[in-house]
Image (cartoon, grey):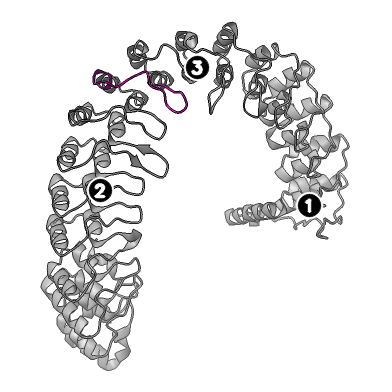
């Protein structure tokens, strides 16, 4: 904190004179106009604020004698007592605080962000003021911004040369060392993160709980491990930090040993092992520490854990193994080291990890370990689908050669490998997978065919191939959307021309009553609009809300779309179910098309879209 941050630039000579302690000048100015004594500067500070900050007790007494308000707040919510508490003239600051308190000033008044005079005094190392405020009943455990206590603010404070002494003073006066902020961070946690062993020892000596975590369940030990601070880890363990405690956060459960395993610091892990670290503890995913080491690609850590009894044959809640983490990462040294130490058989997720790595040699290494090559992960895909998604045709071919079933293999939502192949950007994979299917129009749970998927993802090459193989172009999904409804989302001219030329319905309505033209107008796909109009579709069809394509084009402010529809015969007077015609705006003058105008236009467009849908 700097002094200048709490008063504004002097807005009038009276503030300058108060800050300078010039009583004679102030007297003269007051004689001319007594109202100057309550004048505010740029930050709302009065002459009393300035005098208190600079430690001018005579000016303070003079102003109080003139009946100025002793509890006046500036724009930061600070009173003259706050200012005196921050005064660089510490002795005078204490005298001013005592005087103002005797005149009715609040000694525990919170400022804009709940800063109390005690906090201000602490952050400026004004011990005399702190002593005085506490003797008058100031709450040593009051909380400021973010529910931070005075002690916590001091621990987190920047450039406090007497920080240790201030901490010691507050603790000896009764500051609670375990009082956390809104996120549960305690002074000890923050001290471990940013201070030294002296301050940490002080807090623990004064009864700070060495095992108390924040709302995410991070403890002082976990922060020391995270910072790779060996000396701090050793200190905390020596002072009672429990290394095998399973910490339960809102989203996960784990121990400090898990964190150390993934922290890439063998020195810390060796120390924890020497202190009895349990290498078999499970986190919320049923993973042991060796998973963390493998996932970090830390060969030395993996080796250290195995040499100290960690098993590489374990599996987590999804069937994943430590070697699988290394495989997915492509950590060849760990894979080689763990291969003979892992279970002889593996869940399908290990094969999927090998596929995800993109390395054919890994797939060949583990394909024989999986009992069922057609099984799917609990929360994932089968190996052949994983290979299709990774766009690796060589791995796809290998899996099929080793018995992977393609036709008749259903996955989540009844999607088949052909559905996944249709939406990849690799036409060769789509061709290969389609050659294995008897029914090229096989449906997923939401009634989508592979062609619908290809169109929805804008993969023109795959759509062209599927159509060439006889895929139906009149299909609809559960929402009644046709190929051209899907094309409105992201497709360009090549896909649109292909679909129309292949007989895709141009005027069919979905369950919302929208034709492809209405959808295109709502989304703003003018290429599709032009193609549909050229095919002669009706431009005045209405959806279930009675809205036409012109309604949506007008609401969105797309002038080209409006012009296109009107030129094609769109009825400007047709009303929707609310009795409203298309809201066509006057054409905007180019010179008024400023950045501000465009921002407002986008906001209005979004608001109207939200209301209508």
Q: Nearer the viewer, residue 312 or 8?
A: 312
Q: Nearer the viewer, residue 30 or 214?
A: 214
Is 374 on the left or on the right of 518, as rendered? left
Label 2 crowd bin: few (<14), some (14–19), many (20+), radius 10 Å: many
Is 188 on the left or on the right of 430, as rendered? left
Q: Residue at coordinates 13% horizontally, 52% vertically from top-left?
A: 205
**Element on which disc 3 rests:** helix
Which label number is shown at residue 189?
2
Examine the rendered structure and indicate whether residue 92 appears above or below residue 259: below
Reply yes or no: does residue 256 show up in magenta. Answer: no
Reply yes or no: does residue 308 show up in magenta. Answer: yes
**Element on which disc 2 rests:** helix
**Element on which disc 1 rests:** helix
Image location of residue 81, percent across then percent down:
23, 76
Write down the residue under mark 1.
551
* Gap between marks 1 and 3 measured at Cα: 49 Å
Q: Nearer the viewer, residue 230 or 532?
A: 230
Labelled pair 3, 2 in contact (Cβ < 8 Å): no
Looking at the image, tell me whether mark 1 or mark 3 is earlier in sequence order.
3
Label 1 crowd bin: few (<14), some (14–19), many (20+), radius 10 Å: many
Image quarter for residue 82? bottom left
* Gap between marks 1 and 2 measured at Cα: 59 Å
Is 519 on the left or on the right of 410, as rendered? right
> For the image shown, how many numbered marks are present on the structure?
3
Nearest-to-viewer mark from 1 and 2:
2
Judge whether residue 557 can be spotted in this image.
no
Write down the residue under mark 3.
355
Image quarter for residue 35? bottom left
Please report the bounds of the magenta region as a residue range.
305-321
Give the residue at the far bottom of this rendering.
31
């Amino acid at each position: 904190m700097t002094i200048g941050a709490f008063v504004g630039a002097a807005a009038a000579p009276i503030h300058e004179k108060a800050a300078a302690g010039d009583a004679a000048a102030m007297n003269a100015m007051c004689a001319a106009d007594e109202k100057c004594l309550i004048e505010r500067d740029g930050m709302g500070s009065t002459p009393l604020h300035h005098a208190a900050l600079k430690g001018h007790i005579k000016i303070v007494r003079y102003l109080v004698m003139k009946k100025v308000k002793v509890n006046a707040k500036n724009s930061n919510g600070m009173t003259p007592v706050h200012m005196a508490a921050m005064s660089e003239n510490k002795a005078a600051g204490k005298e001013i605080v005592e005087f103002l308190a005797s005149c009715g000033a609040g000694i525990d008044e919170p400022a804009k962000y709940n800063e109390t005079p005690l906090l201000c005094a602490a952050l400026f190392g004004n011990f005399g003021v702190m002593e005085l405020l506490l003797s008058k009943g100031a709450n040593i455990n009051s909380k400021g911004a973010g529910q931070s206590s005075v002690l916590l603010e001091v621990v987190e404070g920047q450039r406090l040369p007497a920080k240790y002494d201030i901490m010691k003073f507050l603790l000896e006066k009764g500051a609670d060392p375990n009082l956390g902020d809104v996120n549960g961070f305690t002074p000890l946690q923050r001290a471990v993160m940013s201070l030294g062993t002296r301050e940490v020892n002080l807090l623990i000596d004064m009864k700070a709980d060495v095992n108390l975590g924040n709302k995410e369940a991070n403890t002082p030990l976990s922060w020391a491990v995270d910072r790779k601070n060996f000396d701090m880890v050793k200190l905390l363990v020596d002072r009672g930090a429990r290394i095998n405690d399973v910490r339960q956060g809102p989203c996960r459960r784990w121990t400090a040993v898990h964190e150390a395993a993934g922290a890439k610091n063998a020195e810390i892990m060796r120390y924890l092992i020497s202190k009895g670290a349990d290498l078999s503890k499970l986190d919320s995913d049923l993973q042991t520490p060796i998973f963390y080491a493998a996932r970090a690609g830390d060969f030395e850590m993996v080796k250290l854990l195995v040499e100290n009894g960690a098993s590489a044959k374990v599996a987590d809640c999804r069937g994943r193994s430590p070697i699988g983490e290394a495989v997915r990462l492509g950590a060849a040294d760990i894979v080689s080291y763990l291969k003979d130490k892992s279970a002889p058989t593996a869940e399908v997720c290990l094969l999927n990890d090998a596929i995800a790595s993109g390395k054919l040699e890994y797939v060949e290494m583990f394909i024989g370990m999986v009992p069922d090559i057609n099984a799917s992960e609990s929360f994932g895909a089968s190996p052949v689908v994983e290979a299709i998604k990774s766009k690796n045709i060589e791995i796809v071919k290998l899996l099929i050669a080793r018995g992977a079933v393609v036709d008749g293999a259903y996955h989540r939502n009844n999607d088949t490998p052909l559905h996944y192949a249709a939406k990849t950007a690799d036409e060769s994979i789509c061709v290969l997978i389609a050659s294995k299917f008897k029914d090229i129009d096989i449906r997923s749970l939401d009634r989508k065919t592979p062609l619908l998927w290809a169109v929805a993802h804008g993969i023109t090459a795959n759509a062209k191939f599927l159509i060439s193989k006889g895929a139906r172009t009149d299909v609809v999904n559960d929402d009644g959307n046709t190929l051209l409804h899907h094309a409105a989302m992201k497709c360009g001219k090549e896909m649109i021309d292909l679909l129309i030329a292949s007989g895709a319905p141009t005027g069919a309505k979905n369950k919302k009553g929208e034709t492809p033209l209405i959808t295109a107008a709502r989304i703003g796909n003018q290429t599709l609009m032009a193609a549909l109009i050229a095919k002669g579709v009706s431009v005045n069809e209405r959806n279930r809300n009675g809205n036409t394509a012109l309604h949506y084009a007008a609401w969105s402010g797309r002038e080209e779309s409006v012009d296109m529809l009107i030129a094609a015969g769109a009825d400007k007077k047709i009303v929707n179910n609310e009795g409203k015609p298309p809201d066509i705006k006057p054409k905007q003058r180019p010179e008024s098309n400023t950045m501000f105008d465009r921002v407002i236009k986008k906001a209005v467009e979004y608001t109207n879209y939200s209301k209508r849908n």
